Structure formats: C-alpha cells, structure tokens
Amino acid sequence: MRHNQAGQSPMASTSEPGALTVTGRPIVIVDDDVSCLVAVEQILRHWGHETRTFRAFADARAYLAQAQPAAVIVDVRLGNYNGLQLIHFSQSSSPGTQWLVVSGFDDPVLRQEATKLGAHFLTKPLDLARLRELLPPTAA
C-alpha cells in the first residue's frame, strides 16, 4: 500500500461521478473463479489499492465479521451461497462498507436485489472504465 510523505494512507479521489469513498482500508474481492479474482486484484493494486482476496464464502464472511473494508467486490455465485447473502450477513458488522456485486449475467432480478441492498451491480467481463469510476486510483 502506498503512503504519502507523512506516512499516511492516501484517500482516493472522489471527483468522478459515482465514485465511492475509499480510504486506507482494504478492498475485499470475493470470487471462486481464480482467474477473475487475480485479475481484479492486480488491477486494483495497480491503481494503488490495498486488497484482500477470498475464494470461499465462509472465509469472506469470517473476515467481514471482524473487519471493515472500504469496499467489497463479490461475485453472485459462490458455491452453495451467493454474494447477496454475504451482503445480508455482513452489512451490520461492516456498516461503512461499499458493495459491488458482479455477475456473468445481466439478470434484472439480481440487479434489483443488489440495488435494494445498496450495492452497485456490474457484469462480467468487467467494464474497467466503470470500475475505475467507482474505485478511482489512489493519489500517488
């Protein structure tokens, strides 16, 4: 994670429309597809973000019960569970966390459910311009 000259973690710029507030807290990525998980992690790290990754619902849920990340990017399909369930289970313990739900299908019902939960809904393959709009690179 990059730090400014004072040794503090920089805050992401929120000058772009729709940008989420991202401070020195990590962005969590939850996806059981390793290639997607690694690709999103590499992009966010390249943009200066600290990340935590999880392939399993249970591991992500356990982490979110004790941590308050800046944002969580979660795939809809996670084995026997789904990303919307993770939001339900974790919102009370991580009230300041922003949520981005990712799906391989642009399902209007899933989109509506994600929106009701206060999450942004993105489809795969990810639109990097939209992701960058939501999670802008941190200041150098």
Image (tube, rainbow, N blue to C red):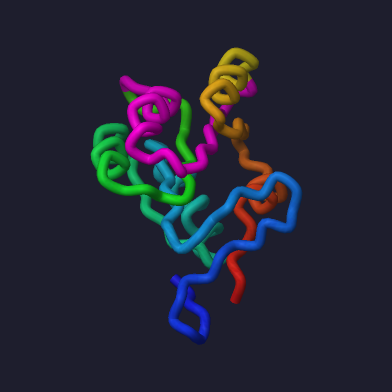
Quadrant of residue 88 within the rendered picture? top left
Residue 55 shown left or right of residue 114 in the figure: left
Q: In the rendered image, which quarter contains the N terminus?
A: bottom left
Q: Which residues are magenta?
A: 80-106
Outermost residue toward the bottom?
Answer: 5
Out of 122 and 37, give the one closest to the viewer.
122
**Position of 133 compared to 105: left or right?**
right
- Give the quarter of the image for residue 34: top left
Q: Is residue 17 magenta?
A: no
How far across and down, in percent of the image, does residue 116 sit? 56, 21
Instruction: Return the residue nearer the eye: 129 or 38.
Output: 129
Q: Is residue 135 above or below residue 93?
A: below
Identify the residue at horizontal 27%, vertical 44% (top origin).
63
Quarter occupied by the C terminus: bottom right
Instruction: Give the left or right position of residue 117, taking residue 26 as reference.
Output: right
Residue 4 spot, x, y in % from top left: 52, 80
What residue is shown at x 46% (from left), y 63% (from top)?
Answer: 24
- Above/below status of 131 relative to 105: below
Residue at the location (54% across, 37% down)? 100
How many labels, in total? 0
Residue 89 image position (x, y, % from top left): 33, 27
Residue extending farthest to the top is 109
Which residue is at 43% across, 45% downward? 29
Residue 112, image x and y in percent?
Answer: 61, 18
Answer above or below: position of 76 versus 70: above
Relative height, residue 113 to residue 45 (above, below): above
